C-alpha cells in the first residue's frame, strides 16, 4: 500500500484494516478536484517562495499528465493500492518528476485538502443538478400547457374535494421544484468557501496567500477558522438535505402519477418507454420508473440521518469518522440526479385521458362548496349554508342524483330563496372560473401563472 505516513511505525498495516481504512475505491471520484486544488496550491507555494519557478513548472506539468492518463487509461486507477486520492496523486507525481513531488505537501494536510476537493466536487454537482432541475421544470410546463384547461378533481384526504385545472395541478409541483432550486443554490453558496491553508487544524506557517488561492479556485471566500475549516461538514449535510427534500417532492409526484395511471383513476397512461411488463400476467403495464423514484427517497433520507449522526459526537477537529461523508453524499447525488432525469423522461411520455378526468371532476359532489357560496351570495351566513348544503347532499345521494340533477322544486323545499340561476352556479366552468384571486385555479389566472413560470425558468437559464 502506498502511504503518506510511516516514519514512526515499525510494523506493516494489517491487510484487513488496510482495506477498511482505504478510501481510494470511492474518493478517486475526487481526482479531478484534487489535481486542480494541487495545481493552485503549487502556484501558491511558488508565490510564497517555497518552490522555484522550475519546480513549479515541473509539478504543474506532472499533475496535468496524471489527469490526462487517468482519463484515457482506466487501469491506471484500478491497479493502484493507494490509501486515498491524495496519496495516489503524490505517488504518481513522484513517479513522473521525482523528489520535487514531495515538496507539494509543504504546510498542508489531507484534512484541509479533502475538504477543498469535496467542495470543488460538490460545487460542480450542484451546478449539474440545477440544470437537470430546470429541464424537469421545463417538461412540467410543457405537459401543463398541453392539457392546460382540462378539469380534474382536486383531493384532500384523497377524497374528491373541488375541481382544478390540470395546469394548476402541475404548477403546484413547479413551485416545489422552484424552492428546490433555491435550496440547491443556497447549499452551493455554503459549499463555495476555501478551507485550504488551514493545515491539519492549527493553520499554516507557510506564507500562503489564501485570498489569492480562493480566487484561483473560484471560491467566494476563505474559511475564517482553521479548526472549523477542517472539521466542518455542514456543507455536505446541506447538500444532502436539499437533495432529500427534492427527492421527497419527486416521490409525491410519482405517487400521484402511479395512482392516476391505475384503472381505478384512469386519468393518464404512461408511455411504453417508461413502464414495464409482468413476467406472468400478460396484461400488466407497471409504473416501475415512478416506483423506483418513490422507493429511492428512503435511501436518500437514510444518508441524511447517517450524516447527522456521524457528526454529532465528534470532538474538534478532524476525525476519521468524517471519511464516511463521501459515499453518502456521492450516493445521494447519483440517486437524486438520476431520479430527476428519469422523472423528466416520464413527463415527456405521459398521455392524459381528459374525458376521464373531467368526468371525475363532475362526480362526487365537488360543486357542493359552490352551492354554499351561492347561498351566501343570497344572504345566508356561511355556517348555515354549509349545514344546509350538507343536508341537500345527503338527500341527493340517497336519490342517486348529482346536485345539477335536483329540480328547482326539490331545492325550494330546502331553501325558498334558491332560484333558476343556481344551475349556472353549479356548473364546472363557473366553479373553476370563480377562483380568480392570485394562486387560484381559474383558467385565466392559471394562464398568467404559466407565463410567469416560463419567465422564471428562462431567467434561470445557465445559472
Ligand atoms: N480519506 C480521508 C477522508 O476522507 C482524508 C483525510 C484523512 N486525514 C487524516 N488525517 N487521516 O476524510
Image (tube, rainbow, N blue to C red):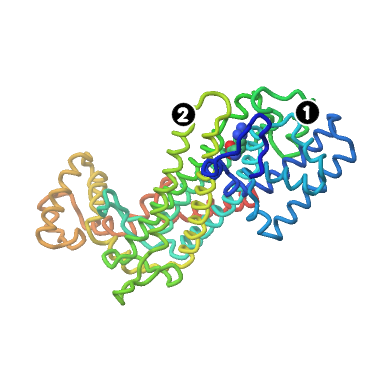
Cα distance between the residues tagged 2 and 1: 32 Å
Front position in the image: 352 or 226: 226
Q: Nearer the viewer, residue 387 or 84?
A: 84
Badge 2 or badge 1: first in the primary sequence: 1
To which quarter of the image does residue 84 belong? top right
Query: On the image, numbered disc 1 is attached to which residue?
Result: 208
Question: Residue 143, relative to residue 412: is it above or below?
Answer: below
Residue 442 in sight in this render: no
* Quadrant of the image containing the N terminus: top right
Please indicate whether residue 88 sits to the left or right of residue 133 in the image: right
Badge 2 crowding class, 10 Å Cα cut-off, few under 14, some 14 to 19, many 20 or more, is: few
Question: Could you tell me residue 341's position as x and y percent?
Answer: 52, 58
How many residues crowd around disc 1 within 10 Å: few (fewer than 14), some, or many (20 or more)?
A: many
Residue labelled with disc 2: 312
Q: Residue at x 36, y 69 (%)?
A: 353
**In the rendering, at what x and y percent does residue 71 appear?**
70, 57
Observer-nearest of 362 and 40: 40
| Residue 271 point in image, percent of width and height | 43, 70
Displayed quadrant of residue 55: top right
Ligand 1 neighbours mark 2 (CB distance < 8 Å): no
Amino acid at each position: 500500500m502506498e502511504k503518506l505516513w510511516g516514519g514512526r511505525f515499525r510494523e506493516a498495516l494489517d491487510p484487513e484494516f488496510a482495506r477498511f481504512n482505504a478510501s481510494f475505491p470511492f474518493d478517486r471520484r475526487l481526482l479531478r478536484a484534487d489535481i486542480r486544488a494541487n495545481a493552485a496550491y503549487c502556484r501558491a507555494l511558488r508565490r510564497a517562495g517555497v518552490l522555484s519557478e522550475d519546480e513549479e513548472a515541473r509539478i504543474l506539468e506532472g499533475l496535468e499528465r496524471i489527469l490526462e492518463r487517468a482519463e484515457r487509461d482506466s487501469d491506471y486507477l484500478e491497479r493502484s493500492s493507494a490509501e486515498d486520492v491524495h496519496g495516489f496523486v503524490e505517488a504518481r507525481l513522484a513517479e513522473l518528476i521525482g523528489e520535487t513531488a514531495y515538496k507539494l505537501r509543504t504546510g498542508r494536510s489531507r484534512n484541509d485538502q479533502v475538504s477543498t476537493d469535496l467542495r470543488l466536487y460538490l460545487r460542480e454537482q450542484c451546478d449539474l443538478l440545477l440544470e437537470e432541475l430546470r429541464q424537469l421544470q421545463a417538461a412540467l410546463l410543457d405537459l401543463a400547457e398541453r392539457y392546460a384547461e382540462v378539469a380534474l378533481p382536486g383531493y384532500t384526504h384523497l377524497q374528491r374535494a373541488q375541481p382544478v385545472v390540470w395546469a394548476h395541478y402541475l404548477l403546484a409541483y413547479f413551485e416545489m421544484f422552484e424552492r428546490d432550486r433555491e435550496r440547491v443554490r443556497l447549499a452551493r453558496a455554503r459549499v463555495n468557501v476555501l478551507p485550504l491553508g488551514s493545515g491539519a487544524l492549527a493553520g499554516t506557517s507557510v506564507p500562503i496567500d489564501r485570498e489569492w488561492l480562493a480566487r484561483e479556485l473560484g471560491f467566494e471566500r476563505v474559511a475564517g477558522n482553521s479548526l472549523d475549516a477542517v472539521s466542518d461538514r455542514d456543507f455536505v449535510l446541506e447538500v444532502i438535505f436539499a437533495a432529500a427534500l427534492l427527492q421527497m417532492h419527486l416521490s409525491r409526484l410519482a405517487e400521484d402519477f402511479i395512482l392516476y395511471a391505475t384503472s381505478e383513476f384512469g386519468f393518464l397512461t404512461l408511455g411504453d418507454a417508461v413502464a414495464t411488463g409482468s413476467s406472468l400476467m400478460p396484461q400488466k403495464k407497471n409504473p416501475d420508473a415512478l416506483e423506483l423514484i418513490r422507493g429511492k427517497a428512503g435511501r436518500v433520507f437514510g444518508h441524511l440521518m447517517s450524516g447527522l449522526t456521524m457528526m454529532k459526537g465528534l470532538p474538534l477537529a478532524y476525525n476519521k469518522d468524517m471519511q464516511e461523508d463521501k459515499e453518502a453524499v456521492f450516493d445521494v447525488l447519483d440517486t437524486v440526479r438520476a431520479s430527476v432525469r428519469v422523472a423528466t423522461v416520464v413527463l415527456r411520455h405521459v398521455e392524459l385521458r381528459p374525458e376521464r378526468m373531467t368526468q371525475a371532476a363532475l362526480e362526487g359532489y365537488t360543486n357542493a362548496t359552490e352551492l354554499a357560496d351561492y347561498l351566501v351570495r343570497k344572504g345566508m351566513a356561511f355556517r348555515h349554508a354549509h349545514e344546509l348544503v350538507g343536508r341537500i347532499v345527503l338527500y341527493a345521494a340517497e336519490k342517486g342524483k348529482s346536485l345539477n340533477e335536483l329540480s328547482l322544486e326539490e331545492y325550494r323545499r330546502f331553501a325558498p330563496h334558491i332560484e333558476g340561476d343556481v344551475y349556472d352556479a353549479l356548473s364546472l366552468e363557473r366553479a373553476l372560473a370563480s377562483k380568480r384571486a392570485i394562486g387560484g385555479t381559474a383558467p385565466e389566472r392559471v394562464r398568467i401563472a404559466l407565463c410567469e413560470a416560463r419567465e422564471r425558468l428562462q431567467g434561470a437559464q445557465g445559472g
